[in-house]
Amino acid sequence: MIPEVMVGALAAVAIWYYYRKLTFHSTMKLWQIGLLVAALIYVGFVMLDGAWTDLPKELMGVFIYSFFIVLSQKSSPYFLAFGWLLHVLWDLIIHPAGIYPYVPEWYPPVCLGFDVAIAAFLFTRILQQQTDPKSRALESK
């Protein structure tokens, strides 16, 4: 399990590194879309496997994470980071390895590493944006 978690974290680092120079607003948009995609992947697994009885549960995940996205837009960007952290629970509690045949066994631990790393990056970026007057001034231009 540890190698899979590390692969997920390294994938997050690579993606973050590639997009690190985006504005704060663009960063938030990118990771809002990413959180929605993370939830939709499970819907895709259900559809590919034909496990239709699990579709409502996976669509509930899409609803939950969409709610966090809306909260991050309307209230505080911290809701986006919390949404990514909450997705860890989706990976570990709702989809423990080997329980649901439609979810590849390697996917939840990879997603765990990815989700935790993205949440950490987001918390850092949000805090930086709030405390660095230079960042705020660049964003307003």
Image (cartoon, helix red, strand yellow):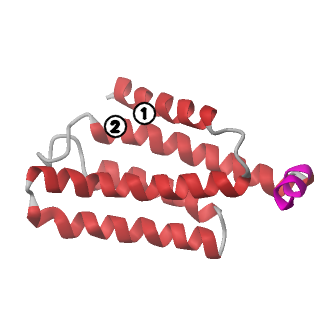
SS at circle 1: helix
Residue tagged 1: 8
Viewer-nearest residue: 95 or 65: 65
At 47% from the left and 31% from the top, the residue drawn is: 11
At 50% from the left and 43% from the top, the residue drawn is: 116
Residue 125 locus on image (x, y percent):
71, 48
Q: Give the magenta range.
A: 134-141
* Residue 140 highlighted magenta (yes or no): yes
Q: Is residue 31 toward the left or the right of residue 47 in the image?
A: right
At 14% from the left and 50% from the top, the residue drawn is: 48
- Where 62 sits versus 99, above or below? below
* Residue 19 highlighted magenta (yes or no): no
At 35% from the left and 65% from the top, the residue drawn is: 62
Q: Is residue 85 toward the left or the right of residue 106 in the image?
A: right
- Tell me which corner region of the image, top left, top right, bottom left or bottom right, holds residue 140: bottom right
Residue 16 locus on image (x, y percent):
59, 37
Residue that protrudes farthest toward the top in the picture: 3
- Give amino acid for label 2: Pro
Viewer-nearest residue: 102 or 120: 102
Question: Can you tell which mark lies on residue 109?
Answer: 2
Q: How many marks?
A: 2
* Mark earlier in primary sequence (1, 2): 1
* Principal secondary structure, stretch drawn in magenta: helix
Q: Is residue 67 toward the left or the right of residue 23 in the image?
A: left
Can residue 85 be seen in the rendering of this structure? no
- Tell me which corner region of the image, top left, top right, bottom left or bottom right, holds residue 86: bottom left
Mark 1 and mark 2 in contact? Answer it, CB < 8 Å.
Answer: yes
Can residue 104 be seen in the rendering of this structure? yes
- Give amino acid for label 1: Gly
- Where 50 sits versus 2, above or below? below
- Mark in the foreground, 1 or 2: 1
